[in-house]
C-alpha cells in the first residue's frame, strides 16, 4: 500500500499564549489521532522535531554554506511529520480530515513516498 508523508507546518506564534492546560489538550489530540492511525495499521512513523537547533545547507556558486536554523522567529516552521499508509492521495486527505494540526491553523502537507524501485519499507 502506498505511503504518504504528512509534513506538519505551523506558525510558532500560534502557541505563544497557550496555557499549560491548552497545550496538554492539544498533545492529547495528537496522541488520539496517531493512536487511531496506529490501531488501523496505518501509522508507519511519526516524530515531533526539536523546537530549537538544526542546520540549513545550501550550495551556491559551487560552495556549500551551512547556517544554524531554522529559527522559531520565522513565520512558519516544520514541527514534525507522520508517515501513513493510504490507498491514494484522496484517501490520505480523508484520513487527515480531523488531524489536530488543522485545529489550530497548522498546515498538513501530504506527499507520496517514492521508494525509487526499492521494496516499500
Image (tube, rainbow, N blue to C red):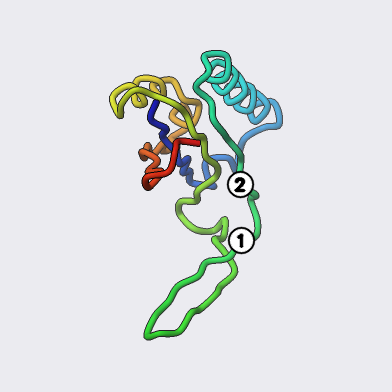
Q: Residues within 10 Å of mark 2 (few under 14, many from 20)?
A: some
Residue bearing mark 1: 54
- Of labels 2 and 1, earlier in sequence is 2
Residue bearing mark 2: 49
Give the answer, above or below, for where 64 lies relative to 82: below
Q: Nearer the viewer, residue 105 or 4?
A: 4
Tell me the number on the disc at residue 109: none
Which residue is drawn at the image coordinates 48% and 43% (left, top)?
Answer: 10
Q: Position of residue 2 (x, y in %)?
A: 38, 30
Identity of the residue furthest to the right in this view = 20
Inter-mark Cα distance, 2 to 1: 9 Å
Q: Position of residue 83 (x, y in %)?
A: 49, 34
Which residue is drawn at the image coordinates 43% and 29% (left, top)?
Answer: 102
Element on which disc 2 rests:
loop
Do the residues bearing badges 2 and 1 touch, measured as CB atoms within 8 Å? yes
Element on which disc 1 rests:
loop
Identity of the residue furthest to the left in this view = 90
Q: Position of residue 75 (x, y in %)?
A: 45, 54
Which residue is drawn at the image coordinates 60% and 18% (left, top)?
Answer: 35
| Quadrant housing the N terminus | top left
Give the answer, above or below, for where 56 lies relative to 92: below
Q: Position of residue 79 (x, y in %)?
A: 55, 45
Amino acid at each position: 500500500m502506498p505511503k504518504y508523508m504528512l509534513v506538519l507546518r505551523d506558525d510558532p506564534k500560534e502557541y505563544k499564549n497557550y496555557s499549560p492546560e491548552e497545550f496538554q489538550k492539544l498533545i492529547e489530540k495528537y496522541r488520539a489521532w496517531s493512536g487511531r492511525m496506529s490501531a488501523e495499521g496505518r501509522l508507519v512513523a511519526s516524530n515531533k522535531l526539536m523546537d530549537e537547533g538544526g542546520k540549513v545547507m545550501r550550495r551556491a556558486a559551487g560552495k556549500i554554506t551551512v547556517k544554524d536554523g531554522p529559527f522559531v522567529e520565522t513565520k512558519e516552521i516544520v514541527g514534525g511529520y507522520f508517515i501513513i499508509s493510504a490507498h491514494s492521495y484522496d484517501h490520505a486527505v480523508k484520513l487527515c480530515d480531523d488531524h489536530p494540526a488543522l485545529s489550530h491553523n497548522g498546515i498538513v502537507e501530504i506527499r507520496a513516498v517514492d521508494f525509487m524501485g526499492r521494496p516499500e519499507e
